[in-house]
Amino acid sequence: MAALGWLTPRKRSATARSVLAGEAAAEAGLRSTQESQATESAPDTAAEVPDFPVAGDVRAAAFFDLDNTVMQGAAIFHLGRGLYKRKFFQRRELARFAWQQTWFRLAGVEDPGHMQDARESALSIVKGHRVSELMSIGEEVYDEYMADRIWPGTRALAQAHLDAGQQVWLVTAAPVETATIIARRLGLTGALGTVAESVDGVYTGRLVGEPLHGPAKAEAVRALAAAEDFDLDRCAAYSDSHNDIPMLSLVGHPYAINPDAKLRKHARKLDWRLRDYRTGRKAAKVGIPAAAGVGALAGGTAAAVALHRRRR
């Protein structure tokens, strides 16, 4: 695994580890899209049509947080349910996963302690298993627990970017393998996620860098933008959590989707656009109409369009 060469002593600073995690996520995300040979069908018609047109601009891309932005709940908890069903761990650990998922759904925000505990549990569970085995299980888990939890409104937003010929990436703390499956099943370009170390296709139980969370997400987007020649001022990002303010602040078109209280306050202060799908209503939007920003963009290259179509 190419990212293994980036491993460094524990005394690296948090900022350096965020950069490491971001670079590893970008590399893993690009590699997974290049290696994918699956043929996907067109996504179902979304329940809600976005109220903004997105003009074709291949130097613009869209970055979507996953948990509670694209999908209700946390992907890692759904994965834990699927692994328990396949006897990867015992009932006591399932109870912990269930409590964390219940708390997450009621609170609607990420608790760093819960998320870290869940990730550490997942790493210990998959240690010694083959990556290919977890990928196969992940496909089944998506159908069992995730497919019915996709927010139609957010999916419509992603589809608008795809219809305009732009790349759309998930950016999540979930394992990159799980995130890649979700992105492919939704017809998105690819996914940036937490990279678990593997040697000869077997998980070691360690991470490359740190979980793709907070500042690490911004570093992953920055690294991907450099690799794909995106103009971040012309890109859009979507998230529900104040933890993703670094990523949202990186792009020219930030959106608060199903926002927690801190992100809602921050979005209103900076005139970011806001949408809420949790109650079936549209929250009052703030800032300039989306069409005034993204809709006025034009340009790009045929090569990038071809790359996008090939990855889909």
Image: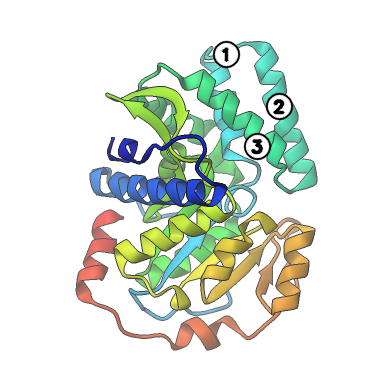
Quarter occupied by the C terminus: bottom left
Residue 216 is left or right of residue 223, and the answer is right
Inter-mark Cα distance, 1 to 3:
18 Å
Identify which amino acid the numbered label 3 is placed on: Met
Residue 129 placement (x, y as % from top left): 40, 18
- Point out the tag, 2 or 1, that comes first from the N-terminus: 1
Q: Nearer the viewer, residue 56 or 301?
A: 301
Identify which amino acid the numbered label 1 is placed on: Phe
Residue 175 is left or right of residue 274, and the answer is left
Quarter occupied by the N terminus: top left
Q: Identify the residue at horizontal 47%, vertical 21% (top origin).
A: 126
Q: Identify the residue at horizontal 61%, vertical 53% (top origin).
A: 151
Inter-mark Cα distance, 2 to 3:
13 Å
Work out whether 309 lies above or below 130.
below
The residue that label 1 is drawn on is 89
Residue 49 at least partly seen: no
Identify which amino acid the numbered label 2 is placed on: Ala
Inter-mark Cα distance, 2 to 1:
13 Å
The residue that label 2 is drawn on is 98
Q: Quadrant of residue 189?
A: bottom left
Residue 184 placement (x, y as % from top left): 39, 47
Q: Nearer the viewer, residue 69 or 233?
A: 233
Secondary element under disc 3, as helix, strand or loop, is helix
Q: Identify the residue at horizontal 23%, vertical 57% (top origin).
A: 310
Give the numbered dot on residue 115.
Answer: 3
Residue 1 at least partly seen: yes
Q: Callout 2: 10 Å neighbours few (<14), some, many (20+)?
A: some
Q: Callout 1: 10 Å neighbours few (<14), some, many (20+)?
A: some
Residue 276 placement (x, y as % from top left): 71, 63
Secondary element under disc 2, as helix, strand or loop, is helix
